[in-house]
Amino acid sequence: MNGNVPQSVKELLGDDLEKFEQITECADKGDWGGYTRLMGGVDVKRKEQFLRICYFIKEECGKYSQPLKKLIGVVVSHASTVLTRLRTWVVKSIKRPSSIVGCKLAGVDGCETIESSAPWNSVNNCTRPPKKKLK
């Protein structure tokens, strides 16, 4: 038995624990053939697979009025639900202090205070005026 499976999950799965561990081991090793075979083969219907993803349907709708789903765990053998997503994460932007832009170094007149912007990439990395072409 895999030591990574918590005792509460072991009790919940009962007889299905061994197959659950075999499937997760194949998935972790990248053994696609073994994983597919243990899940029921290539012709099995999704609702008949040994493991299925379990979603929570949120009350609010998305941008195009589609239902919003949140992955919360897996359903094992059409009976037991194992919750794997126990934390909820929130993405927040970090407020950065204003900074003085090095305009003088770039040859631009009039320095001003601005908020920190996104890091440079291949599109927005030019802050200097275009160079004059030599004739």
Image: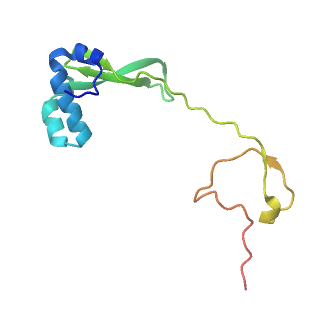
Quadrant where the N terminus sits is top left
Quarter of the image where one finds residue 78? top left
Q: How many marks?
A: 0
Please say whether residue 114 is visible from this viewpoint: yes
Residue 67, percent from left and from top: 43, 23
Which residue shows up at 14% across the image and 38% down it? Answer: 34
Q: Residue furthest front?
A: 3
Rendered position, 51 above or below 120? above
Please say whether residue 42 is visible from this viewpoint: no
Choose between 94 and 117: the one closer to the eye: 94
Residue 93, percent from left and from top: 63, 35
Quarter of the image where one finds residue 77? top left
Q: Is residue 121 left or right of residue 35?
A: right
Quarter of the image where one finds residue 94? top right
Quadrant where the C terminus sits is bottom right
Which residue shows up at 25% across the image and 25% down it? Answer: 52
Rendered position, 117 above or below 41? below
Rendered position, 124 above or below 85? below
Which residue shows up at 23% across the image and 13% down it? Answer: 11
Residue 104, percent from left and from top: 83, 62
| Rendered image coloring scheme | rainbow
Which residue shows up at 30% across the image and 19% down it? Answer: 82
Q: Residue furthest bottom?
A: 135
